[in-house]
Amino acid sequence: MSPAEPKPRKYSYYVEARALEVTDRPRRFLETFAAVLEHSNYAVALDAYARVCSKCGRCADRCQLYETTGEERDVPGGRGDLLLRVYRRYFTIGGRLKARLVGGFTLTDEYLDRMAEEYYRCVACRRCKEVCPMGIDQGLITHLARWLLAEVGVTPKALVLAVREQLQGVGNTSAIPVAALKNTCEFLEEELQDIYGVTIQFPFDVEGAEHVFFPAVSDYLLEPDTLMANAAVMHVSGGSWTIGTGNYDGINYGLFYSDRMMERIVGRLVAEVRRLKARKILIGECGHATRSAWFAPTFCGPDAPEVVNFLQYTARALREGKIPLKGKVIEERVTYHDPCNIARAGRITEEPREILRAICRDFVEMTPNRTHNLCCGGGSGLVSVDEIRPFRTRKMGKMKADQIRATGARIVAAPCANCKKQLREVCEDNGLADVQVVGVHDLLLRAIDFGVEPKAEEKVESSSQAMA
Ligand code: SF4
Ligand code: SF4
């Protein structure tokens, strides 16, 4: 190997350092860091964090990774300090002066590798922030560190490929062409007719609708019950909505590794709403898609469309008496998983519970719950990285598995595409294979009173399998 060639990285799931020479990475990292500090609001937070962390270690009490592994490397404050150390050394007068007088810490390629590994162990759940006496947000530090690492070519391949497909390929992360999307929706319409005896249509490109619908596009492949329920809620409540063929994917993996990418993807949602002369972005059952869409005013200006999560829409329609129910038809014990991105970050905690309590006979809470809930273990995009499944499910997800087991529930409702995938794997890998992980709307669909007898009751529970 010639000295100019980049060394192969030891992490198989990281993208290679592209065309950059290894010796270029620290310089490039610092140049990007300087630009971000100059042109964004990160400098204010980072400067405060770099000064106030008292190394008290209280954050370790709330980190499910540290609680599971007990490894020093997983103490949140220590991980955060990896980036803060670079900040202090290169971007404060004291750090620069000290370096000139006595030398000391220098950013190296090996240090960047260590950062890459550590910042892709944190799921950015932000539980540790709740107990930090200084209000330090380790999730924010992880977020920024990943962005800077992305600029030197270090990002899990799965995230990069998904974003590339969205921005340069077919236009969505699952590479579903419009014809296939329409076929799928026709199939779902037939299922609604066959199973529930109702005629419900998925509308396309309706100009002037109130909402443009953006589920995680993977729902079209994996979550037919969630989508049928979404359409059914709109049908019975008289909602005004459309799917846009210009963009029908709410997923935004930019949130997990690059503000630059996140901005471009949010811009695509806003553009589609404007193209269709609609008023609101309606996000399906997906936590990170909702949270990233909330940045629309930041990236697209104050007149950006309002963002509504489907749980908010449905709970409101239920309160207004627009969703007729057959009653509490779900007899199995059900528990609810709060996705970090809508619960801790967005305070959407009561809406799903209103829905579940209206339809479940035996609803039980996990402990802790709501804004204190545990991450599924696959947050911050890690769920997409198949190579680290044992880490995700047996380390990060172990406390979540214990939490589910303690409820005795056979059904976990999780209104997030990423949480559903991760929780299914967590259950499989932790002796909970008989636990079903479903969407909140999936259960609601079974309880909606369409005023007709279902044609094939036994099919109600197996429509997911029919899609498989
Ligand atoms: S709890 Fe806050 S102040 Fe204490 S070590 Fe953790 S980050 Fe630092
Ligand atoms: S954000 Fe979550 S995973 Fe990351 S250090 Fe804090 S508690 Fe641990």
Image (cartoon, rainbow, N blue to C red):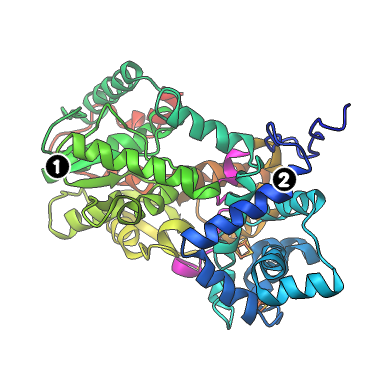
Which span is picked out in magenta?
Answer: 369-385
Please name the residue that numbered disc 2 is placed on: 25
Q: Which mark is residue 332?
A: none
> Residue 50 at what x, y percent from top left?
64, 74
Q: Quadrant for ligand 2?
A: bottom right
State left or right for residue 312 relative to residue 39.
left
Identify the residue shown where x is 12% and y is 56%: 321
Out of 91 and 343, give the one closest to the viewer: 91
Q: Which mark is residue 236?
A: 1
Residue 168 lies in quadrant: top left
Kind of residue indicated by mark 1: Val
Helix, strand or loop status at disc 2 = helix
> Residue 144 at what x, y percent from top left?
57, 57
Q: Earlier in the sequence, mark 1 or mark 2?
A: 2
Helix, strand or loop status at disc 1 = helix
Q: Is residue 230 visible?
A: no
Identify the residue shown where x is 55% and y is 51%: 380
State left or right for residue 57 relative to residue 238.
right
* Label 1 Cα neighbours within 10 Å, binned few <14 / some 14-19 / many ≥20: some
Quadrant assignment for the N terminus: top right
> Residue 141 at what x, y percent from top left?
59, 63
